[in-house]
Amino acid sequence: MYYAFIIGVNQEWPEQRTSHGDKALAFCLSRHCCLPRENKIELFDDRATRSNVLAALENLLDYRNSKVNGKNGGSGSVRSNGEEDTLLFYYGGHGKRDEFCTHTTCEAGDEEWLKHNDIIELLERKFHGGKVWALVDCCHSGGFGEAVMEKCNASNRSLNVQYGCIMSTPAPYTAGEEWTMTECFIKAFRGELQCSKDLQYLSKTPCSILNENTTHATTNTISPNFRPTFSQVIDFLSDEMARIKNERLCTLFCGRDMENGTHLNRPCVFSENDLLPCHGSRSNLLTVTSSSNHNQHQIGRDTRWMDPFIRKKFSVNDEIFIKWNGLSTSLDVDNSNSDEELNPRFMLGWFPGRILSLLEKEEGDATTQVLIEVRDEISQSRWTIIQQIGSSGQFCPKNVLAGLPFGFGLDPQKCATSVARMARNLAYIDTSLPPWTRVSMLWTDGEYYDASTLCPTEIEWEKGMECQIVGPSVVV
């Protein structure tokens, strides 16, 4: 059974909301995914207060649980444990690292904003056995993934809910004004994203999708029944976010079938019906699940945005960005003296990394192997991969990008200025220790503090990194 909970606080962009924004997504779920009215709640603008959100979400979860428990005419008898139940949780609007900026009038006595932990705690209490796709489209949205990961660690990796979190920007960064992420899932649920050689684009201009007579882009290079998987849609979105907004999409997958990729390799649909709009029966859907086929069948995209970041030569210790789509076995970063491997986890998107070594090629081999450390700031995990370099010195696939260790689209001059200011204050970037290494640090007050190193992409370099030192966890 499918459920949806939509929160939108976006008065600033009224023209785009009904075309490819929060209200368009709500309409899509009702009209094109045929989601029953009682299975969906939407709260927009002044209705989206903290108390309204929590009360409405609890009511929706209670309704779901009544069906799971066999109430409402015995409708829960088929899925007594609700393990196939899926909730789409969506937030679009303003955000901070640990909370959503829900509606407030800024007057005395107003409610607090909505903490990420408020949502997670409610889901853990009342959505047992289900899976949640969390689409968070706001500034600092990666903070929601951090809250989920914190809950996962606190529960000894034993969550009641499986989470697939897709977040428009890393936790330290703000987001742009385009509805790129929201529009992508609207198109996916409508069946407008297809795996083919034809280029697919997410628009930057409003175009009403509420009009029944609106024509849609199609392709004749593949079967009309072919629907991309969640993995393929998110992979496409990560490139479009970089192309359109110069931003890096963040993801986190927690729970057995999220972490092993089972849910990610299912068709990206959100429909309870066997007959999907315009695309035949679900049993006839064609999907790609193997990693080899994934490279052959993907959503066509414009990759020209990558050209300024492509380099022919790399050296040891170069900071890079690398596209990853699949399982990774991470090292235990909670114990800096341990090389213990954790269970494999599905990772998807562009990740920061570092060249560890250039491996010698065998005699007669025209390629060179590169050992790369890949990092995920949300789960604070790192893993190593081996990448092939062609005889020309250039990476064979277009999945490794060079550049400063600061992120997509940032102004190099501002970043360099930040580093210079730190140097004048006797602070510097130390790459001798891996990210998230536990250390003891002598602070400016003469006291020692427990601290942790950071990944370079966790710092808001472009904002200037003024000379004030903000706390013991800053890399100095």
Image: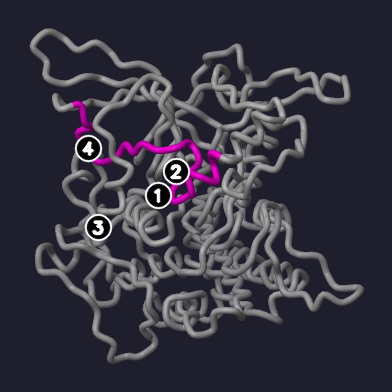
Locate residue 315, reporting x and y percent.
34, 22
Q: Is residue 14 above or below residue 55?
A: below
Depth-wise, is mark 1 or mark 4 nearer the camera? 4
Mark 4 or mark 2, earlier in chain: 2
* Residue that mark 2 sits on: 257
Position of 83 relative to 138 (above/below): above
Residue 32 showing in the rendered view = yes
Q: Secondary structure at mark 1?
A: loop
The quadrant where residue 344 appears: top left
Which circle marks residue 263 in the picture? Answer: 1
Q: Residue at x 38, y 72 (%)?
A: 204
Q: Are marks 1 and 2 in contact (CB under 8 Å)?
A: yes
Residue 442 image offset from top left, x and y in percent: 79, 19
Task: Name the colouring of the figure.
Answer: one colour
Quadrant that contains the C terminus: top right
What residue is pinned by disc 4? 397
Rounded to the nearest angstrom, the CA distance separating label 1 from label 2 is 6 Å
Most foreground residue, 305 or 138: 305
The disc labelled 2 sits on which kind of residue?
Answer: Asp
Query: What's under tag 3, amino acid-wise?
Result: Asp
Residue at image mark 3: 302
Marks 2 and 3: which is nearer the front?
3
Whether residue 143 appears in magenta in the rendering, the answer is: no
Query: What's under tag 1, amino acid-wise?
Result: His
Number of marks: 4
| Structural distance between the alpha carbons of marks 1 and 3 | 27 Å
- Judging from the image, what secondary structure is the residue with disc 2 in? helix
